[in-house]
Image: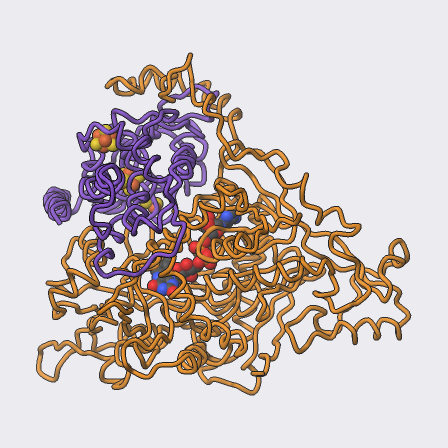
């Protein structure tokens, strides 16, 4: 029996796991922390679907148009069509597993969101992510108990494992023959539907008299139990759902510290293609708080919040300038995020303005505060110590979302066999700029599609479904890497033995080993302490390895470099400086994970350098124009033979 | 609502007390109970730390201490990376729960300047330590499975039930309530509020949709063991109205279940 390995347990991972379980197929659901801690629980505003419950004649076709336009036509139209068509069904399905979306007269209440002309964002208070996650977690628990979902929720994925396989006209016989390594692939062998030209490729090999080519496939992932330090391996097929790369911008994003991006970096190092890495979304309304940026949800503007800045008037006074309303009379404060962030950047740097942009919600009705925005108000009050119902909130743009990531086709297949990706780690649906409310939707939908495709693929038992080569072997044939059974739990124990909790003869309080813990005694004086520390260094070496893979000091340096190079506005000189500084930092890299971060950081900068135009989230002062002819394409980054290669690939035609 | 008010009041006081520090932020001492693993001896280690501003949290201080090139303790001895868990840094994921100055709290919710000095950090005590401030809270997730907290059948959306469902969805699985609960023991039969809150969401739906076992589990693992002192509600960093949820769930799982079919609608 096959098992599918799902890496990451946020919305997309849970969605993939549920899809497998509903088909009766077992899966391993692996995450560094339990689902309750995934970034998905932070989502506030809601999920888009053209449910048309507001009497505005909405339809999936309009949702499709808004998504394509919001992404400035970089997204794969076929994939987006699948997403927007499926959206209403997804919301209904979530309702059926108990998600309490806001209702009015028994049907769904939808709110307006940025970049969309109609109201189509379903929500649950201002904690949509948390509430949707809860329902999915409960649902997954049912299948965990039934033995279909095997959860590993303190398992950090530290490395992607690949294996060679051989592509030839008659595969098994080719084994052991001369394999021409690194045969230059004509374009890419594995690409999205419609361009699956492996056949052409194999015949071109024939012409050149090459018997077989060695290629890489995903064979599994290496995982470290963060509680014991034990390393284990889980086999392919793998669906990656590890979220965005917030960890490359520590302290500067609205996201979580757990989404390090290191697994994406490891995949990249192993040759997996990444797309549109330069597309980083700056959310217009964020606030710096201790250790991160706090998001003020788009719902605030959806419910009527207005952006303004103080501007000098002719006489000596100041006026509130509602710049978005003046410049964009149709969508006003609900323009797509890239547009607002750029406008804010401009007015903030304008001579006759006060420098600080404010979000004014003081005119909102009491019902709105008590119901729809209650959580938001509580949060702002607790972190900023100001009441948004009484005072405008000072806001500025901050990094929020990564449109780019693991390149996948409409079925969520990545560029390497046995690898799928979904959710924020994947490059799909959002093009050059994501619309608010589309990414929760994309995570749920993408996880489902990826799992469905993986199941079809596995059911067929044939690799040729992937490569298009009839002569490929069965997946479960002679390939030990795909045979799941014994490999699954190599060295990994999910259950803590309760007996182990007992320390010192059966007392359950775990810290009782230290007499000082439960007494009120303060730590001793300095002398005693230094005595203690003399054997500290000895102890330091014992114990389990649960330090971070990337030294925080190193991570911070990388963050500073990337943040300078990849701001809201970019130019060549800025990015070249960042590249040089990264190369210098490379010498300090001490672990593979650190080296991989540098590699992915460079790929981001190179992608941004090569896209010599301005589009969506990528704005260049040296190339301010949008240039469809050259760049209405997907930026593809690939690591090959020690070099990062950037190329541009056509967007699939709408079928 | 009552809880909400309490919180905002507390914040106000904090704000005022914070203002006294305007201008000069003093250097603080942070004492951390360190341990390299369950089988290693715990020991206290002190650090000097100057908060960046008056609102800096313990979570941010831990991050910045770890960002130092060579972390040293107060005596200049090298100290290895301080191990702790975080994710959201905004009180929404429960990862960073630890005992701060004797009280279980979220590190991302604990403002340094508002704490008793020196600031003492210890891991949660009811759970096995993994290392330093990181604990193994697996038992909480296992208990939820034991509770059989899931729906068997489709839920029907209902405006009436939404408010309750929202409240019941707010548990962070942080474990602070278990830390203070006199009746919860990791291997015990009583599962505490960390299991009650998520279960109440399931009990909220029509009884036909529930997994029938959940009521039995509820009585056995929650109702029977709770002393109703509500220490848990006072400590809950999410401010969940535990009392409300519990009385509704008791009604659904205990009273109504035993007195036959009374109003199924709740
Ligand atoms: C503050 C905020 C508000 C948002 N609001 C909205 C909104 O209103 N509407 C909307 O549509 N979208 C919103 N988003 C975006 C949306 O929440 C995310 O894009 C989406 O939830 C991503 O889901 P995911 O499954 O891809 O990843 P995540 O939920 O981030 O999950 C990633 C998973 O991978 C695991 N993981 C990561 N790295 C590793 C590793 N190395 N080893 C093991 N496990 C690993 C994590 O533990 C986690 O389980 C918001 C995002 C933020 C930050
Ligand atoms: S009311 Fe008391 S006994 Fe019951 S869970 Fe809360 S703290 Fe524990
Ligand atoms: S009930 Fe409150 S204290 Fe207990 S785990 Fe949930 S959020 Fe934490
Ligand atoms: S880090 Fe999420 S609650 Fe503190």
Q: How far from the left and from the top, in percent, is residue A109?
A: 26, 70
Above or below, A640 against A588 in this view is below
Which of these two is toward me, A478 or B239? A478
A164 relative to A267 in the view: left or right:
right
| Residue A10 percent across, percent down from the top left | 45, 53
Observer-nearest residue: A248 or A493? A493
A649 left or right of A347 in image: right
State left or right for residue A329 relative to residue A81. left
Residue that protrudes farthest toward the front in the picture: B260
Quadrant of the drawing holding the C terminus of chain A: bottom right
Please name the colour scheme applied to the rendered image.
by chain
Q: Is residue A148 visible?
A: yes
Tell me, yes or no, if residue B106 can be seen here: no
Residue B145 drawn above or below residue A361 = above
* Colour given to chain A in the rendered image: orange
Judging by colour alone, the chain drawn in purple in this rendered image is B
Picture residue at 27% right of the left edge, 31% below the top: B29
Judging depth in this view, the residue of B164 and B92 nearest the camera is B164
């Amino acid at each position: 029996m096959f098992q599918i390995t799902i890496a990451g347990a946020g919305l997309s991972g849970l969605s993939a796991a549920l899809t497998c379980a509903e088909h009766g197929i077992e899966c391993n659901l692996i995450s560094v922390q339990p689902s309750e801690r995934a970034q998905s629980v932070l989502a506030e505003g809601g999920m888009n679907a053209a449910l048309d419950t507001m009497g505005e004649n909405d339809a999936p076709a309009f949702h499709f148009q808004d998504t394509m336009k919001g992404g400035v036509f970089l997204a794969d139209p076929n994939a987006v069509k699948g997403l927007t068509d499926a959206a209403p069904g997804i919301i209904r399905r979530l309702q059926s597993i108990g998600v309490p979306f806001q209702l009015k007269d028994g049907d769904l209440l939808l709110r307006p969101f940025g970049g969309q002309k109609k109201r189509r964002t379903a929500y649950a208070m201002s904690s949509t992510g948390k509430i949707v996650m809860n329902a999915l977690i409960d649902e997954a628990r049912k299948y965990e108990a039934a033995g279909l979902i095997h959860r590993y929720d303190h398992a950090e994925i530290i490395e992607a494992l690949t294996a060679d396989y051989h592509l030839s006209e008659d595969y098994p016989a080719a084994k052991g023959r001369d394999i021409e390594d690194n045969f230059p692939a004509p374009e890419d062998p594995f690409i999205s539907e419609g361009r699956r030209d492996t056949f052409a490729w194999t015949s071109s090999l024939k012409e050149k008299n090459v018997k077989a080519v060695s290629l890489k496939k995903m064979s599994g992932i290496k995982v470290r139990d963060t509680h014991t330090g034990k390393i284990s391996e889980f086999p392919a097929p793998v669906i990656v759902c590890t979220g965005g790369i917030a960890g490359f911008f520590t302290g500067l994003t609205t996201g979580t510290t757990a989404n390090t991006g290191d697994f994406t970096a490891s995949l990249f190092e192993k040759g997996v293609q990444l797309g549109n890495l330069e597309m980083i979304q700056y959310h217009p309304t964020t606030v710096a708080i201790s250790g991160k940026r706090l998001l003020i949800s788009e719902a605030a503007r959806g419910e009527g919040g207005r952006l303004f800045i103080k501007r000098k008037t002719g006489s000596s006074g100041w006026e509130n300038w509602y710049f978005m309303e003046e410049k964009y009379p149709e969508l006003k404060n609900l323009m797509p995020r890239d547009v607002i962030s750029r406008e804010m950047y401009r007015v903030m740097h304008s001579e006759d303005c006060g420098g600080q942009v404010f979000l004014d919600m003081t005119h909102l009705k009491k019902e709105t505060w008590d119901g729809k925005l209650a959580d938001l108000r509580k949060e702002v009050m607790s972190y900023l110590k100001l009441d948004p119902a009484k005072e405008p909130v000072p806001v500025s743009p901050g990094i929020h979302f990564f449109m780019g990531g693991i390149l996948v086709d409409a079925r969520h297949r990545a560029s390497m066999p046995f690898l799928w990706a979904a959710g924020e780690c994947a490059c799909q649906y959002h093009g050059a700029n994501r619309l608010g409310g589309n990414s929760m939707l994309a995570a749920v939908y993408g996880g489902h599609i990826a799992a469905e495709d993986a199941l079809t693929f596995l059911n067929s038992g044939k690799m040729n479904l992937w490569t298009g080569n009839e002569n490929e072997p069965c997946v479960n044939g002679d390939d030990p890497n795909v045979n799941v059974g014994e490999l699954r739990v190599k060295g990994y124990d999910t259950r803590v033995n309760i007996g182990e909790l007992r320390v010192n003869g059966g007392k359950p309080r775990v810290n009782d080993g230290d007499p000082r813990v439960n007494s009120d005694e303060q730590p001793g004086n300095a002398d005693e302490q230094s005595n203690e520390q003399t054997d500290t260094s000895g102890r330091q070496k014992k114990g389990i390895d649960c330090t971070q893979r990337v030294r925080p000091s190193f991570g911070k340096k990388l963050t500073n470099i990337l943040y300078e190079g990849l701001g809201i506005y970019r130019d060549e000189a800025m990015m070249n400086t960042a590249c040089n500084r990264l190369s210098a930092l490379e010498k300090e890299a001490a672990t593979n994970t650190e080296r991989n971060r540098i590699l992915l950081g460079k790929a981001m900068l190179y992608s941004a350098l090569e896209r010599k135009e301005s589009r969506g989230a990528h704005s260049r002062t040296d190339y301010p124009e949008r240039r469809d002819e050259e760049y209405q394409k997907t930026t593809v980054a690939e690591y090959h033979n020690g070099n990062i290669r950037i190329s541009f690939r056509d967007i699939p035609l709408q079928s | 609502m009552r809880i909400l008010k309490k919180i905002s009041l507390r914040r106000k006081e904090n704000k005022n007390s914070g203002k006294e520090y305007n201008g000069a932020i003093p250097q603080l001492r942070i004492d951390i109970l360190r341990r390299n693993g369950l089988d290693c001896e715990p020991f206290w280690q002190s650090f000097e730390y100057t908060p960046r501003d008056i609102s800096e949290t313990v979570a941010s201080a831990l991050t910045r201490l770890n960002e130092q090139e060579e972390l040293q303790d107060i005596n200049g001895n090298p100290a290895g990376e301080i191990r702790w868990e975080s994710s959201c840094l905004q009180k929404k994921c429960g990862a960073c729960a630890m005992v701060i100055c004797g009280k279980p709290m979220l590190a991302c919710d604990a403002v340094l300047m508002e704490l008793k000095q020196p600031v003492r950090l210890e891991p949660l005590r009811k759970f096995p330590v993994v290392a330093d401030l990181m604990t193994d809270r697996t038992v909480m997730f296992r208990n939820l499975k034991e509770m059989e907290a899931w729906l068997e059948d489709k839920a029907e959306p209902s405006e009436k039930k939404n408010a309750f469902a929202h409240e019941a969805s707010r548990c962070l699985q942080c474990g602070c309530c278990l830390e203070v609960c006199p009746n919860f023991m990791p291997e015990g039969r009583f599962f505490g509020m960390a299991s009650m809150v998520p279960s109440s969401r399931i009990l909220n739906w029509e009884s036909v949709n529930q997994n029938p076992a959940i009521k039995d589990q509820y009585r056995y693992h929650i109702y029977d063991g709770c002393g109703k002192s509500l220490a848990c509600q006072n400590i809950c960093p999410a401010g969940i109205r535990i009392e409300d949820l519990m009385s509704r769930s008791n009604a659904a799982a205990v009273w109504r279940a035993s007195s036959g079919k009374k109003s199924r609608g709740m």
